[in-house]
Image (tube, rainbow, N blue to C red):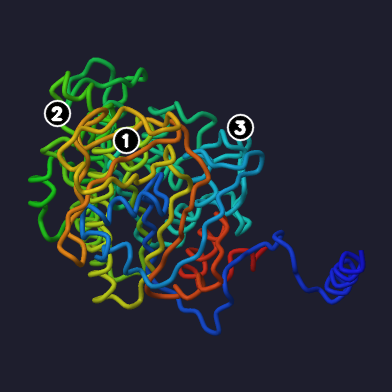
Amino acid sequence: MMLHMAFRWVAIVAFLLGIVVDAGAATHLAPLKKHKKGNVIFFHPDGTSVSHWTAARMMIAGPDGMINWDRLPEMAVYRGHMKTRLTATSHGGATTHAFGVKVDPDSYGMDRDRPLTALSGKPMSIMREAIEAGMPVGVVNSGNIDEPGTGVFLASSESRRNGADIAQQIVLSGAQVILSGGEQWLLPKGVSGRHGKGARTDGKDLIAEAEKLGYTVVYTRDELLALPADTKRVLGVFAHDHTFHDKKEEELRKQGLPLYEPDAPTVAEMTAAALDILSKSGKRFFLVVEEEGTDNFGNVNNAAGSIEALQRADVAYGVLRDFLKRHSDTLLLTAADSDASGLEVIAFTPDRAGQPLSRTTRNGAPLDGRDGTGTLPFLAKPDQFGRSLPFGIAWSGFEDGAGGILARAEGLNAEALRSGSCDNSDIYRLMYLTLFGRPADSGK
């Protein structure tokens, strides 16, 4: 009782003195003694928790090794709750990243079906505000063009399912770089493209419109890598839908489909091309990148696909970190908004390496080996003792959960994450501070 009363008096005194002592603080970012304006790169490996990166490390470098994600020096625990839900949706979480405010889970650049005012006080996303300020911007996604991790930065819709309208907003946004899948939303229904037939019901050919606006349109990895050095605008259309096939391992084998389209560029290759174009402008730029396969493969409990997507994302981190070494006036910020399906690494003794795994763990959780259910375990790269140890991947469900998610950063103003805690709205705050040189709410 005495301790309880003492705590109450401390809280009252703290309130009177204006000291914030609870979790209701507007921001969790550490104060910066001095901040600078510069380029911003936000990389969103969708659905990735610490457990996902643990699995990636096993396969890339072994349990004692280091991957590119490990080398990002600043980090904070990410809090992704929404206005009316404790876990994020992809479109709602992305909206908070792009606008800096918490919204209804079923939101795509709006607060459900209501227009949204960003934390800066402007009725637009941070990327739209950057375009208005004359900055070059770009979006890169291994998924469909309307995937929200990048899409909400350029488009707003009352429904995530309005793919045709979202695609039109993105293509007409003025972004210098747009690289993704989603050809279906760029062509009229029934019109054949490079990857399949269009699905638009309004008769519009957005690829033709993009060409009129000065975009060079490319459809494959080879075409992207062969872009002329003086390219200023590019629209990459690398698949009919996603550049990957987000189905279970067994279904992919049945249909004879690969995890990723072999002719499509990887997220790392797209990122490198985007950086080359944006950095040549000589102006401060803003780039948002998403590896969507890390989420979608998890949501169908495909462990092999999840690990492949994680490996691709880690290569992209390497591309981004190399860019930072040459351009110190750049912030690299990264976070997921949720944990895709609760991936967990389950260890097995060395003698199990050649034996197929059981279908579930002892509590009934689905268990994947390297080729799906009931197959041989994954083998980690050698540890410090030279042993390649077996493991499986267990799943908690098909949904996106809260998970153990880290926001990480390197470069300009990255030390703001030294607070150790980061709200999803802080992603916007740190990007805004770096792009515009002032706190997001300073003009409100």
Q: Residue at x 41, y 75 (%)?
A: 412
Q: Hey, what amino acid is under mark 3?
A: Asp
Q: Is residue 167 left or right of residue 14?
A: left
- Single out the mark in the foreground, 3 or 1: 1
* SS at circle 3: loop
Q: Residue at x 18, y 35 (%)?
A: 355
- Mark 2, Cα crowd under 10 Å, few <14 / some 14-19 / many 20+, is few
Q: Nearer the viewer, residue 157 or 385?
A: 385
372 vs 111: above or below: above
Q: Is residue 101 left or right of residue 224?
A: right
Task: Of the two numbered discs 1 and 2 on the same chain, state the one appearing first in sequence.
Answer: 2
Q: Position of residue 433 (x, y in %)?
A: 52, 69
> Residues at badges 3 and 2 in contact (C-beta under 8 Å)?
no
Q: Hey, what amino acid is under mark 2?
A: Arg
| Image quadrant in which the C terminus is located | bottom right
251 vs 42: above or below: above
Q: Which residue is mark 3?
A: 113
* SS at circle 2: loop
Q: Residue at x 37, y 66 (%)?
A: 332
Q: Which residue is mark 1?
A: 297
Residue that protrudes farthest toward the bottom in the picture = 33
Q: Residue at x 36, y 30 (%)?
A: 360
Alpha carbon distance from label 1 to label 2: 25 Å
Q: Nearer the viewer, residue 321 or 230?
A: 321
Q: Position of residue 105 (x, y in %)?
A: 58, 37
Image quarter of residue 43: bottom left
* Disc number for residue 194: 2
Q: Position of residue 160 (x, y in %)?
A: 47, 31
How many callouts does the rendering have?
3
